[in-house]
Image (cartoon, grey):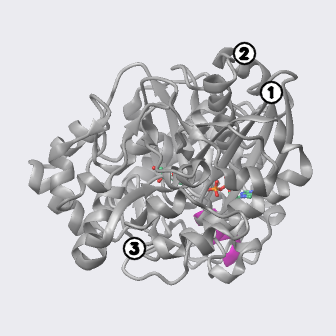
């Protein structure tokens, strides 16, 4: 009994991996892409298309269906009865609204029926706002005003009031549908919702994911009464407990034992957010390593010895699920912006990648502010990308230059916006779906003037969950697990290929263009 299972319910897919902590091998992996496998939800990229006014929602039933398909696939690839520890992670900030029937239904799931079918009647809000939602500017201002300004929100919660964060989202729900808000008995994050379903009970949420709500006091990792009151009336009793990442919150529910062949009594470790979980899976839970994740969003994060806040109010402090805290900067225009450019020219990923071989580093004066949708770092809404550098380029007439301009712009912006963390890493550890693309990874190395490494085991979010579960329930130390599973893939390491000066000049130009665009924003 030395298998540990880690589940990753992210924006576009639900994936998992099973590790054997004695032999140090990944025993099985599986992934369910929401758009491909569950097209009936009308969410080709994991969210319901066509939201208005910045609203972006997903259907929580889709996450449940995907979990079932995933476990079914996994049970065909390995003997799930050997799993002795489980944890997981979810996309951050998304929230699930449940009525008074929730506690009873989640505690008596029938393995003869589906999860979505049984939990359907427990949703007090039929869809879940997710991290891509930018519709709560008004609510952010109201919450900040109620507690004494954004500096106070930031000092308490580790972030200023942020549109995609759960507190402002809850406030918007309360304002727009009081009756449904009042019918809500419990509000879970994606992570704690799925953890609850797996234990057949009401799970706590962890400090890593909880800090993404603008509701938790990061000095003691408990709900902050002022922020909770400023968000919506009666909210405190609708919130689950907050616990550290080392908490075992229950045993795997009978439903999963009967349906997928798990053993009875498997301990389940509290779930966390996808970024905090990735911190662990990248072997970066101790201060010293910087991780850049290129998933649907791009994120830059590191475990921190001290709590440091972003003076520009764009960065965040989250709990580190192993101990202490982590700093994180999120770039909402991540993979979907790269895809936006790719699709505009009808390219596939190979053509996208080839663009870097026919364009020079620094892009010969072609520059892009690569923000297709409202961005969080910096906070702006330009209504679309801004292109600068000649008439043909500016009217989207040069596909290859546009590809390079998008990617260079993204990482120049990342370097500028993360300077507040005061980190000058010798290596940047890259993960997430786009990190396997060598051309993109090379731009990261060039812009940051830093060696870039990827790990042998990809899927750092699921891996981090499996590692945390193994520490909590299988008596393994994090150091042992890192030595087994978090080794860099030496063959894929990349060194900077250009002089520092190339991007220094382009960065100055980028910042000037950004300031000008924001002035008219
Ligand atoms: P999430 O965990 O947020 O659901 P992933 O980490 O799985 O996302 O990353 C998915 C993204 O990876 C896709 O949106 C896609 O744009 C990107 N991606 C996949 N393959 C490539 C590639 N070859 N080059 C660049 N990006 C890629
Ligand atoms: C982090 C953030 C995203 C989501 C989805 O603040 O909003 O990275 O966690 O990956």
Residue 134 picture location, percent across and down? 37, 67
Q: Badges 2 and 1: C-beta atoms under 8 Å apart?
A: no
Picture residue at 68% right of the left edge, 39% below the top: 460
Q: Is mark 2 within 8 Å of ligand 1?
A: no
Span colored in magenta: 337-344
Res. 417 image quadrant? top left
- Magenta-drawn stretch contains 21: no
Name the residue located 23 percent from the left edge and 76 percent from the top edge.
Answer: 178
The residue where tag 3 is placed is 124
Quadrant assignment, res 169 = bottom left
Q: Mark 3 to mark 2: distance in Å?
A: 44 Å
Residue shown at 59% from the left, 71% from the top: 118
**Badge 3 or badge 1: first in the primary sequence:** 1
Return the residue nearer the eye: 519 or 426: 426
Q: Which residue is mark 1?
A: 2
In front: 22, or 515? 22
């Amino acid at each position: 009994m030395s298998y540990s299972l880690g589940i990753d319910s992210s924006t576009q897919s639900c994936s998992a991996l099973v590790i054997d902590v004695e032999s140090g091998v990944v025993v099985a992996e599986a992934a369910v892409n929401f758009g491909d496998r569950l097209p009936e939800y009308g969410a080709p990229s994991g969210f319901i298309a066509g939201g208005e006014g910045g609203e972006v929602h997903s259907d929580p039933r889709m996450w449940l269906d995907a979990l079932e398909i995933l476990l079914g696939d996994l049970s065909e690839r390995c003997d799930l009865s050997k799993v002795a520890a489980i944890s997981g992670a979810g996309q951050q900030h998304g929230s699930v609204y449940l009525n008074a029937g929730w506690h009873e239904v989640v505690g008596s799931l029938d393995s003869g029926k589906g999860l979505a079918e049984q939990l359907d009647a427990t949703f007090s809000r039929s869809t879940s706002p997710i991290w891509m939602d930018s519709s709560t500017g008004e609510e952010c201002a109201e919450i900040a005003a109620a507690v004494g300004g954004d500096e106070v929100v930031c000092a308490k919660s580790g972030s200023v009031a942020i549109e995609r964060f759960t507190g402002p989202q809850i406030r918007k729900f309360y304002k727009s549908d009081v009756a449904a808000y009042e019918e809500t008995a419990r509000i879970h994050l994606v992570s704690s919702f799925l953890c609850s379903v797996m234990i057949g009970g009401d799970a706590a949420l962890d400090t890593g994911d909880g800090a993404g709500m603008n509701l938790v006091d990061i000095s003691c990792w408990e709900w902050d009464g002022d922020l909770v009151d400023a968000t919506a009336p009666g909210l405190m009793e609708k919130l689950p407990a907050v616990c550290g990442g080392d908490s075992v919150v229950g045993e795997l529910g009978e439903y999963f034992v009967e349906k997928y062949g798990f053993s009875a009594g498997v301990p389940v470790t509290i779930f966390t957010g996808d970024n905090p979980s990735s911190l662990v899976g990248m072997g970066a839970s101790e201060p010293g390593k910087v991780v850049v994740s290129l998933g649907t969003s791009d994120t830059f994060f590191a475990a921190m010895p001290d709590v440091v806040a972003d003076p520009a109010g764009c960065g965040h402090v989250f709990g580190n699920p192993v101990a202490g805290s982590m700093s994180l900067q999120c770039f909402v225009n991540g993979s979907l912006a790269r895809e936006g450019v790719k699709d505009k020219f009808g390219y596939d990923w190979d053509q996208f990648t080839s663009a870097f071989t026919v364009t020079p580093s620094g892009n010969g004066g072609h520059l892009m502010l690569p923000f297709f949708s409202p961005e969080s770092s910096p906070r702006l809404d330009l209504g679309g990308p801004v292109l600068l550098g000649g008439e043909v380029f500016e009217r989207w007439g040069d596909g290859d230059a546009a590809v390079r301009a998008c990617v260079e712009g993204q990482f120049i912006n990342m370097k500028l916006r993360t300077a507040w963390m005061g980190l000058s890493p010798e290596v940047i550890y890259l993960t997430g779906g786009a990190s396997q693309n060598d051309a993109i990874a090379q731009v990261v190395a060039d812009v940051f003037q830093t060696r870039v490494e990827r790990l042998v085991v990809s899927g750092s979010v699921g891996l981090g969950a499996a590692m945390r579960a193994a520490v909590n329930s299988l008596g393994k130390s994090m150091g042992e697990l890192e030595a087994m599973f978090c080794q860099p893939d030496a063959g894929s390491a990349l060194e900077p290929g250009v002089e520092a000066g190339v991007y220094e000049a382009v960065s100055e130009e980028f910042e000037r263009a950004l300031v000008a665009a924001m002035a008219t924003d």
